[in-house]
């Protein structure tokens, strides 16, 4: 059977407006955390091993404090050990590197995460590259970036891993699909593109300098938006039936809720895009909850690898 293409799909969408399936990241993340917890319990029972995650927070950034607190709670809920290290903003780079050296050597620690951003006086890349790549559950170490880019076994950044899990769940095999990643950050855009390429998608990375970005995005079966610009992607950018993954978390004014009130929105204009796309993640409640779930999955993976055990099934790239 020949499926309708391009203009035909546009015309169909006009006479038969679609409502996209909502990809529920909260439920999906709860399922991932549940599977992690089951395998953590088995690790302890059978091998007497408890995975441990160390999180390092420098300074008082309120958003970072919330993330770190949630990470700690969910780590313990999954049956793992949580080690939190809170350092003053004025900590020297040498002191931070010394802590990382201690965590690298600590047998109870299988995963290390240094919360970003770091204060300006600290060299971020230097700190990330000081983490033992085997414990680099963020996948930001240059070795893991290189391993991912060359299709080798790596630690994979959590947010792109979460997006990939949702896409595989929706489509099964992604091979041959046109994917457009909007944004080229080291944390999301670049690793996302690598993961999609590894799953045999035809991948385009669009960014602030991309010409005719609407046209580029309209060719995509899969759109991953990770630019940090509130509601930038609207219905006119989307091919009817496409799957849209919204990584953005932007706070905007919400006068409808009262004076001075705000609300969270993604990089995608949900209301308009949901009328054209086949599936879409909401903000909040889409990609967000998947990031910590994948951090737990990566910590379990790191622990299994460190102990020469098989990797947890369905929780890796
Ligand atoms: N800050 C915002 N996102 C992240 C993340 O995924 N990892 C770390 N370490 N810091 C972040």
Image: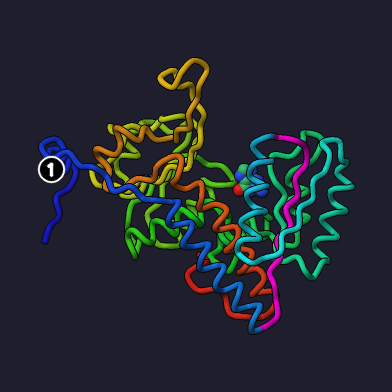
At which x and y percent is residue 27? 43, 55
Asked whether residue 218 is in view, the answer is yes
Residue under the image location 49 percent in, 62 percent down? 32
Q: Does residue 233 show up magenta in the picture?
A: no
Residue 94 placement, left or right of 277: right
Residue 1 placement, left or right of 271: left
Residue 235 placement, left or right of 41: left
Q: Report the front residue among 282 and 256.
A: 256
Asked whether residue 205 is in view, the answer is no
Q: Report the front residue among 6 and 313.
A: 313
Q: Secondary structure at mark 1?
A: helix
Q: Quadrant of the N terminus?
A: bottom left
Q: Quadrant of residue 257?
A: top left
In the picture of the structure, the residue carrying the numbered disc 1 is 8
At which x and y percent is residue 38? 54, 72
- The residue range painted magenta reads 47-61
Q: Is residue 55 above or below residue 208?
A: below
């Amino acid at each position: 059977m020949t499926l309708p293409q391009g203009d035909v799909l546009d015309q169909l969408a006009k006479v038969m407006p679609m409502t996209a399936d909502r990809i529920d990241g909260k439920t999906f993340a709860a399922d991932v955390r549940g599977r992690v917890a089951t395998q953590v319990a088995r690790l302890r029972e059978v091998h007497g091993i408890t995975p441990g995650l160390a999180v390092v927070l420098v300074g008082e950034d309120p958003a970072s404090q919330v993330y770190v607190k949630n990470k700690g709670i969910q780590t313990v809920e999954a049956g793992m050990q949580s080690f939190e290290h809170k350092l003053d903003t004025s900590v020297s780079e040498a002191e931070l590197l010394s802590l990382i050296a201690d965590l690298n050597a600590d047998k109870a620690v299988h995963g290390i995460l240094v919360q970003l951003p770091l204060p300006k006086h600290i060299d971020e890349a230097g700190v990330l590259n000081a983490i033992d790549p085997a414990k680099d559950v963020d996948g930001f170490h240059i070795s893991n970036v290189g391993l991912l880019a060359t299709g080798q076994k790596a630690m994979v950044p959590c947010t792109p891993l979460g997006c990939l899990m949702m896409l595989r769940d929706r489509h099964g095999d992604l091979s041959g699909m046109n994917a457009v990643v909007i944004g080229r950050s080291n944390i999301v855009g670049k690793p996302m593109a690598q993961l999609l390429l590894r799953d045999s998608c035809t991948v385009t990375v669009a960014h602030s300098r991309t010409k005719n970005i609407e046209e580029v995005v309209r060719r995509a079966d899969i759109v991953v938006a990770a630019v940090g610009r509130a509601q930038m992607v609207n219905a006119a950018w989307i091919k009817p039936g496409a799957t849209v993954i919204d990584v953005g978390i932007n706070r905007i004014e919400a006068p409808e809720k009262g004076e001075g009130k705000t609300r969270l929105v993604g990089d995608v204009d949900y209301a308009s895009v949901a009328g054209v796309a086949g599936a879409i993640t909401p903000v909040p409640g889409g990609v967000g909850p998947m990031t910590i779930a994948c951090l737990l999955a990566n910590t379990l993976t790191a622990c299994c690898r460190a102990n020469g055990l098989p990797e947890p099934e369905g929780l890796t790239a």
